[in-house]
Image: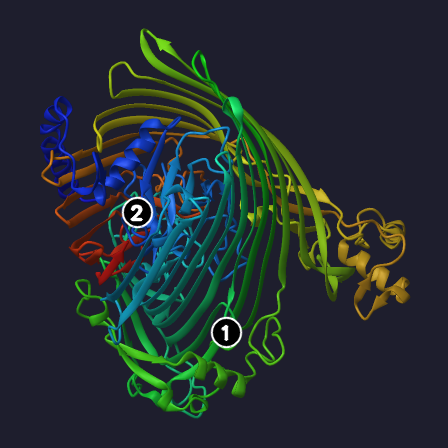
């Protein structure tokens, strides 16, 4: 964030905070007038925004440990249209957006992999397709799959607790769905709205969203039924300038792609060359990509409850969600060969490029549509992603409230999450076309948007359709399924009076199974042209303009236009003309389709048994009411992992220092097992030194399990090995979870029913991070001639100083029956090959992070106005050093950033209005040889509604009202990785509730 923007932010928050606090003393001294609502006798029921805020404040106030919550404003009405968007309003919570919508959640600097999501206290399966270029492996929960209309509330547990499921170092997020017997009577709502997304490149359609919920009870409120459903259709676009980079080099390094060394001829083309100890990166490729996105989301819920007596309640529930996303990509791009280049650079120690240019040789042939004429290519590519995530959960709950404060609860559920492609091509596909004859190409990095430009050789028009030549293709097929069966038995004893307040005890059993599969078919030897341009009809190409797709960012000199195409038609032509799917260079496809057969297929099972005990006490501390809760959770987990791998059968010695593993052409599963256990204590103390004030202190241990890729059971062997042995890789089901030891301190003042001020401090010490090591092992019983009887016979005849070449020739001459040509085959008596197997392990690396959370929620008397302000500071001791080259291994924590929210609202006389501002500072999004940063981002959302007659409300919404965009970079701001303009999304509709 620029200094002026940070100063503006500080002034804004300080000014608004001061305005809020002006009313605190008066609000605390006098009872605040009730907001308007439904009156029944002497009871006033507050509804709308105020009701939601009051309910959330009550949850926070009465909670054990540090908990924040969001509650529905009314049945079928959540504060935001997306759960993740609502969660980002909570102190310490940030979100990652995909296609303009909140998708993944970060809490206190820990990303989505480190936060466990439960639904009604049940551990739920996850299904995320990932990057589309590898087997899915994430445990992250995709909030885009769930509509907010069927949610009653969300609770974010930031401190550990023995009674809740483990798996979240950052937090455990519990989503609560409505239950009919919780609110007896007939209640419901129906909402219809139209959504206009201004990001759409073509058409600007208005898409529908319909949701409804009905809840009723009968038989003297002994039986309850709730049914909810929603349908959402959305069309949007995301336009991106992308730049790929080579590794971070020192100025003194001489590698492929590095800048010419001083004193060499090409060095004269470099302005302000980085010094010997400066770090810099050169671009490898760049493109402008236009993505058109169609999303269809269907959600449904059904709940049946039966209460035959006051102390016994049975619940059967079913939750369903289906989210189908189709993304069509059209892009124009350039690649660099790093030969005849010119460039200019900023000063070190981290030097950023100002521009980078490369010149190329002229085509070797005569340009035309009927032949491949060579030369440098300008890429016109297209891609398609179309996947469907489907989640199903069936659950049963039986609660019995016995005598003397004893309660028992039995809960069980069977849930699945699955994501897979829904077309005949796969989950992520790309097709390449190109016009050959680029004379030179340049990227200028002096603006927010990288400016890509080029010049063609004389006589070559890049917009001549007849010169567009087909090139490479790739069809990727990914599949992921997670099934969870869980049974929980919970008991509680509530003690009336005295030191003992309650005892909670129980046990949870979770049986989780995962299948992750991936396959690809590719033709990567045709980038110079799969065939002449005449093989593709000219009418398939549509002219696409670019500057208008990057409003506020477009620069003079950027590429003005290019050709897009219909993916399905082009894919059929690739198959018809070049057998891209039926006879690919790499991989194989299912018959009659382009769906790649899986060459990666991983199965992982985790079974976790977790008993727990928690004791809560109540007493006076220094003559003030206090509570102390102590709990312990013990978890034991067994992991069984299997993976499909190619089966090797023998080895051959093909050259002096080259030996090959020979595979059968078949595949089989290799299997590994692991187990671990954890004791997870949790202690919470709170004291009220004065009325409506709470001081809290908590200490807990929490864990997060490794991603599924690290746990996979496959052992793969590299085909080529040496005289000294071979190499390979395998997963490690024995990895123990990340563990965090947490301290939480907070002070909270609840000076009015829906108003409070809080400040909190947290500290986390995290261990069991994952690195890699190499282990020596034989694999599949493979043997090698090295050191065997024939080898020793050669040494005996030639002497101990014989060379490898001499030994090979001796064996070929004297053991002809074991030789095929000049290839020496394995033979009986040969020793086993030693393979160095790379595998993930838990390292001794540790990290600590800490931070502060400040929050104000204030209602201005009975005016209807109110504000919510919060600010989170996060610091960590593992920070990436951008001045180090990529050859220096580094460990750093990702996701750490400050964040803030400011919400102003009005809720009175049937009119509700809200303006919400959310900000997140720059953060390290990905680590490794090169850092990847996402730059600071802020967004303003607004909504308003008016109840025309009781039960009938009209509403309008605006998301990203000012159209803020996003940007990322590597070591230097000029090492831009992506730039995306932002666009507003608008909605309007009506809601009928009863």
Residue at image coords 36%, 15%? 626
Residue at image coords 22%, 33%? 754
Mark 2, residue position: 86
**Residue 847 location in percent, x, y?**
44, 31
| Mark number displayed over residue 454 | none
Which image quadrant: the N terminus? top left
Upstream in sequence: badge 1 or badge 2: 2
**Residue 622 location in percent, x, y?**
32, 6
Placement of 485 over or under 408, stated as above or below: below
Is 17 left or right of 283, judged from the image as shown? left
Which image quadrant: the C terminus? bottom left
Is 608 left or right of 310, judged from the image as shown? right
Observer-nearest of 85 and 457: 85
Q: Quadrant of residue 777?
A: top right
Mark 1, residue position: 423
Is 978 left or right of 477, judged from the image as shown? left
**Residue 563 location in percent, x, y?**
32, 80
Which type of secondary structure does the marked residue at label 2 adopt? helix
Is 780 left or right of 49, judged from the image as shown? right
Observer-nearest of 43 and 745: 43
Which type of secondary structure does the marked residue at label 1 adopt? loop
């Amino acid at each position: 964030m620029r200094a002026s923007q940070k100063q503006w932010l500080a002034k804004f928050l300080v000014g608004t905070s001061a305005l809020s606090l002006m009313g605190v003393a008066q609000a605390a001294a006098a009872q605040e007038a009730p907001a308007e609502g439904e009156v029944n006798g002497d009871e006033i029921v507050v509804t709308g925004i105020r009701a939601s805020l009051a309910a959330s404040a009550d949850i926070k106030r009465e909670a054990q440990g540090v908990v924040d919550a969001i509650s529905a404003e009314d049945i079928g009405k959540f504060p935001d249209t997306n759960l993740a968007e609502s969660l980002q309003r909570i102190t310490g919570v940030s979100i990652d957006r995909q296609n303009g919508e909140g998708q993944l959640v970060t809490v206190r600097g820990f990303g989505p992999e480190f936060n466990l999501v439960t639904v009604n206290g049940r551990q739920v399966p996850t299904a995320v397709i990932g990057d589309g270029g590898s087997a899915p492996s994430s445990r992250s929960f995709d909030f885009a799959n769930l509509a907010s209309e069927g949610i009653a509330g969300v609770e974010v547990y930031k401190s550990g607790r023995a009674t809740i499921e483990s798996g979240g170092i950052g937090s455990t997020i519990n989503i609560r769905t409505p239950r009919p017997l919780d609110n007896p009577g007939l209640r419901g709502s129906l909402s219809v709205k139209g959504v206009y997304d201004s990001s759409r490149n073509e058409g600007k359609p208005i898409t529908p969203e319909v949701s409804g919920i009905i809840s009723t009870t009968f038989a003297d409120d002994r039986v309850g039924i709730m049914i909810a459903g929603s349908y959402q259709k959305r069309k949007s676009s995301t336009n991106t300038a992308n730049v790929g980079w080579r590794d971070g080099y020192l100025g003194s390094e001489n590698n492929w792609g590095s800048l010419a060394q001083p004193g060499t001829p090409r060095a004269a083309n470099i302005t302000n060359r980085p010094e010997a100890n400066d770090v810099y990166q050169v671009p490898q490729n760049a493109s402008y990509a236009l993505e058109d996105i169609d999303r269809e989301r269907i959600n449904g819920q059904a709940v049946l409850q039966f209460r035959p007596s006051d102390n016994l309640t049975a619940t059967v529930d079913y939750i369903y969600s289906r989210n189908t996303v189709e993304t069509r990509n059209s892009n124009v791009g350039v690649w660099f060969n790093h030969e005849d280049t010119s460039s200019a650079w900023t000063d070190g120690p981290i030097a950023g490029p100002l521009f980078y240019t490369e010149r190329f040789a002229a085509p070797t042939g005569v340009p035309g549509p009927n032949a491949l004429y060579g030369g440098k290519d300008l890429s016109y590519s297209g891609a398609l992603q179309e996947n469907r995530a489907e989640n199903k959960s069936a659950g049963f709950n039986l609660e019995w409230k016995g005598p003397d404060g004893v309660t028992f609860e039995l809960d069980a559920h069977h849930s699945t999450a699955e994501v897979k492609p829904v077309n005949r091509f796969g989950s992520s596909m790309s097709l390449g076309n190109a016009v050959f004859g680029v004379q030179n190409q340049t990227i200028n990095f002096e603006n927010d948007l990288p400016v890509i430009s080029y010049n063609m050789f004389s006589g070559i028009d890049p917009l001549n359709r007849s010169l567009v030549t087909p090139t490479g293709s790739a069809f990727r097929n990914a599949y992921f399924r997670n099934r969870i069966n869980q049974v929980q038995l919970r008991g509680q004893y509530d003690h009336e009076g005295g030191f003992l307040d309650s005892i909670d005890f129980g046990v949870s059993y979770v049986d989780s199974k995962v299948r992750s599969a991936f396959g690809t078919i590719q033709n990567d030897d045709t980038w110079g042209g799969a065939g002449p341009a005449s093989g593709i009809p000219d009418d398939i190409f549509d002219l696409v303009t670019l500057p208008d797709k990057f409003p506020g960012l477009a620069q003079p000199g950027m590429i003005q236009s290019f050709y897009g195409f219909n993916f399905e038609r082009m894919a059929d032509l690739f198959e018809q003309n070049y057998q891209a799917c039926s006879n690919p260079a790499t991989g194989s496809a299912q018959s009659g389709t382009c769906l790649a057969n899986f060459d990666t297929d991983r199965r992982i099972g985790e079974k976790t048994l977790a008993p727990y005990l928690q004791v809560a006490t109540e007493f006076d501390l220094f003559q003030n009411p206090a509570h102390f809760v102590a709990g312990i959770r013990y978890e034991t987990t067994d992991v069984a992992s299997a993976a499909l791998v190619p089966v090797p059968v023998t080895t051959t010695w093909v050259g002096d220092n080259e030996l090959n593993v020979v595979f059968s052409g078949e595949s089989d599963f290799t299997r590994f097992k692991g187990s671990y256990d954890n004791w997870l204590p949790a202690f919470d103390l709170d004291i009220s030194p004065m009325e409506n004030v709470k001081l809290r202190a908590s200490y807990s241990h929490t864990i997060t399990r490794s991603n599924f890729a690290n746990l996979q059971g496959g052992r793969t062997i590299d085909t080529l090995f040496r005289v000294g042995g071979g190499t390979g890789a395998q997963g490690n089901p024995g990895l123990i979870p990340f563990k965090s030891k947490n301290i939480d301190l907070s002070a909270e003042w609840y000076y009015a029913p829906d108003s409070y001020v809080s400040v909190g401090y947290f500290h986390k010490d995290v261990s069991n991070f994952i690195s890699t090591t190499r282990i020596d092992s034989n694999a599949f019983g493979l043997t090698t001639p090295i050191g065997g009887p024939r080898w020793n016979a050669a040494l005996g005849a030639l002497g101990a100083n014989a060379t490898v070449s001499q030994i090979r020739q001796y064996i070929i001459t004297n053991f002809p029956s074991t030789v095929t040509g000049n290839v020496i085959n394995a033979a009986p008596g040969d020793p086993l090959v030693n393979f160095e197997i790379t595998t993930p392990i838990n390292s001794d690396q540790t990290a600590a992070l800490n931070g502060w959370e400040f929050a104000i929620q204030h209602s201005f008397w009975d005016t209807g106005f109110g504000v919510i302000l919060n600010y989170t500071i996060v610091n960590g001791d593992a920070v990436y050093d951008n001045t180090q080259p990529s050859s220096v291994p580094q460990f750093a924590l990702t996701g750490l950033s400050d964040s803030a929210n400011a919400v102003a609202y009005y809720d009175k006389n049937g009119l509700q209005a809200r303006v919400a501002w959310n900000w997140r500072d720059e953060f390290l999004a990905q680590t490794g040889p090169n850092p990847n940063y996402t730059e600071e981002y802020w967004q303003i959302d607004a909504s308003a509604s008016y109840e025309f007659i009781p039960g009938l409300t009209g509403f309008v919404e605006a998301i990203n009202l000012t159209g803020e965009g996003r940007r990322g970079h590597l070591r230097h701001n000029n090492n831009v990785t992506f730039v995306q303009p932002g666009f507003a999304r608008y909605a309007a509709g009506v809601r009928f509730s009863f």
